[in-house]
């Protein structure tokens, strides 16, 4: 089944839908997405390295997971769906999910020329378990190359020092004090 994204006008209002694999081009229209940061019960933050087969920013370190709500799907439901589809985390292990950057929007151009152009609310999800819980993660290789748990302050310092090593949305999200305060 081909994934669809919700197209938006300049006021961030839905105006239709299109297939995800057709909209991500050099002229990507504005569309709806989300970004999620996952914190373990022991305060560790999950970061993931995008699969080398990804169309945009392959092999780049980024937030815990992200995605696009389907037409008619609430963002919180899409987050729970993608927690399984992308990193293999049972959504029942998420005890708190909070939108911390409801108005986040970015546009970035990958070195291949593909544009990301998204209204992308940013969420923080808290797990009921510690980062070292056996079997907690089961990332899909077509989505995630590798992952690491980090102290949030260490990630912030690393992204500030070497922004080129991370996805542009990670760098922009972490620059916002509202997210830094949540992590």
Image (spheres, rainbow, N blue to C red):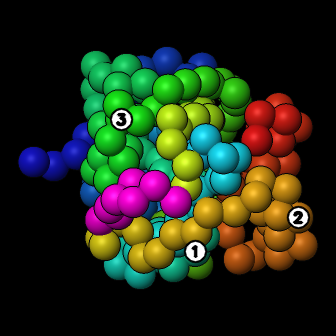
Front position among marks 1 and 3: 3
Nearer to the camera, 4 or 69: 69
Nearer to the camera, 169 or 14: 169
Q: Secondary structure at mark 1?
A: loop
| Location of mark 1 (residue) | 60
Boundaries of the magenta span:
132-140
Q: Distance of mark 1 from mark 2, alpha carbons?
A: 17 Å
Residue at the image position 22 percent from the left and 46 percent from the top: 3
Asked whether the residues under the numbered discs 1 and 2 touch, taking CB atoms below 8 Å apart as contact, a structural biologist would say no
Q: Distance of mark 2 from mark 3, alpha carbons?
A: 29 Å
Q: Is residue 135 magenta?
A: yes
Q: Quadrant of residue 135?
A: bottom left
Circle 2 Cα neighbour tier, 10 Å, few/some/many (<14 / 14–19 / ≥20) = few
Asked whether the residues under the numbered discs 2 and 3 touch, taking CB atoms below 8 Å apart as contact, a structural biologist would say no
| Location of mark 3 (residue) | 91
Q: Position of residue 100 (x, y in %)?
A: 69, 27
Asked whether the residues under the numbered discs 1 and 3 touch, taking CB atoms below 8 Å apart as contact, a structural biologist would say no
Q: Secondary structure at mark 3?
A: helix
Q: Is residue 126 magenta?
A: no
First in sequence, mark 2 or 3: give its number. Answer: 3
Front position among marks 2 and 3: 3
Residue 161 seen in the current view? yes
First in sequence, mark 1 or 2: give its number. Answer: 1
Circle 3 Cα neighbour tier, 10 Å, few/some/many (<14 / 14–19 / ≥20) = some
| Location of mark 2 (residue) | 157
Q: Main secondary structure of the magenta part?
A: loop
Q: Position of residue 127 (x, y in %)?
A: 52, 38
149 relative to 23 in the view: left or right: right
Q: Is residue 163 above or below residue 90?
A: below
């Amino acid at each position: 089944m081909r994934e669809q994204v919700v197209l938006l006008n300049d006021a961030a209002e839905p105006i239709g839908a299109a297939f995800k694999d057709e909209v991500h081009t050099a002229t990507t229209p504005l569309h709806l997405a989300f970004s999620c940061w996952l914190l373990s019960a022991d305060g560790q933050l999950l970061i993931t390295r995008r699969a080398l087969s990804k169309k945009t920013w392959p092999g780049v370190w980024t937030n815990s997971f992200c995605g696009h709500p389907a037409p008619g799907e609430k963002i919180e439901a899409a987050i729970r769906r993608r927690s399984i589809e992308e990193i293999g985390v049972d959504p029942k292990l998420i005890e708190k999910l909070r939108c911390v950057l409801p108005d986040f929007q970015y546009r970035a151009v990958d070195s291949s020329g593909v544009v990301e152009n998204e209204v992308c609310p940013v969420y923080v999800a808290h797990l009921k378990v510690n980062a070292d819980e056996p079997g907690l993660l089961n990332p899909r290789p077509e989505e995630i190359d590798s992952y690491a748990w980090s102290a949030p302050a260490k990630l912030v310092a690393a992204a500030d020092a070497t922004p080129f090593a991370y996805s542009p949305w990670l760098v922009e999200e972490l620059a916002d004090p509202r997210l830094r305060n949540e992590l």
